[in-house]
Amino acid sequence: MSEIDSIPEIDLRPATAADAEAVATIWAAGWRDGHLGHVPEALVAVRTPESFRARAAQRVGDTVVAVAGPDRQVAGFVMVVGEEVEQVYVAASHRGSGVAGRLLAEAERLVAAGGHRRAWLAVVPGNSRARRFYQRSGWIDDGLFDYPAVVGDGTIPVPCHRYVKPL
């Protein structure tokens, strides 16, 4: 088997309500991997499994999922609103498989299709794996800012790097 043959087929499609549970599971696990120890404890306290389930269900219309592997299950997802790439997460079992690159390219396409000339996203400083990925993908660190993480009726400021990419 050649190296090309060993790369799993990755398909992208708009999320459906039936995908919300898989998205929530991937989101919660990935969020913990990249954020614990790097965000305010007040935010960690409200980012419960239930909060990810509720938000995944509410955000189906903003979500594209990647399906991959022999079981054709949800392997990752991206959420885009306007010019912001809000969420990019890949299941741990699919990291390094090309899923993240496909999702990010789709996010860039969606931002451009929305009439924007530049995409942006936020990454906490301690999430070095994500920061390396975005830099390898041509995104530029535009500096630190406080991202207003929505919690209930308010927000919690989260120190982040703003990454940008001209489209």
Image (spheres, rainbow, N blue to C red):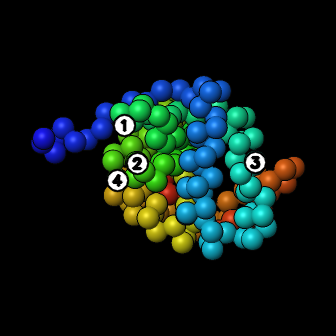
Query: SS class of the residue under badge 4?
Result: loop
The residue pinned by badge 3 equals: 50
The residue pinned by badge 2 equals: 94
Residues tagged 2 and 1 counted as in contact (Cβ below 8 A): yes
Query: SS class of the residue under badge 3?
Result: helix
Q: Residue 47 lies in what quarter of the image?
A: bottom right
For mark 1, does the 10 Å Cα neighbourhood hold few (<14), some (14 to 19), or many (20 or more) residues? some
Residues tagged 4 and 3 counted as in contact (Cβ below 8 A): no
Residues tagged 3 and 1 counted as in contact (Cβ below 8 A): no
At 59% from the left edge and 31% from the top edge, which residue is drawn?
A: 19
Q: Label for residue 119?
A: none
Query: SS class of the residue under badge 2?
Result: helix
The residue pinned by badge 1 equals: 69
Q: CA distance from mark 2 to mark 3?
A: 23 Å
Name above or below for residue 81 compared with residue 40.
above
Q: CA distance from mark 2 to mark 4?
A: 6 Å
Q: Earlier in the sequence, mark 2 or mark 1?
A: 1
Query: SS class of the residue under badge 1?
Result: loop
For mark 2, does the 10 Å Cα neighbourhood hold few (<14), some (14 to 19), or many (20 or more) residues? some
Q: Is residue 117 visible?
A: no
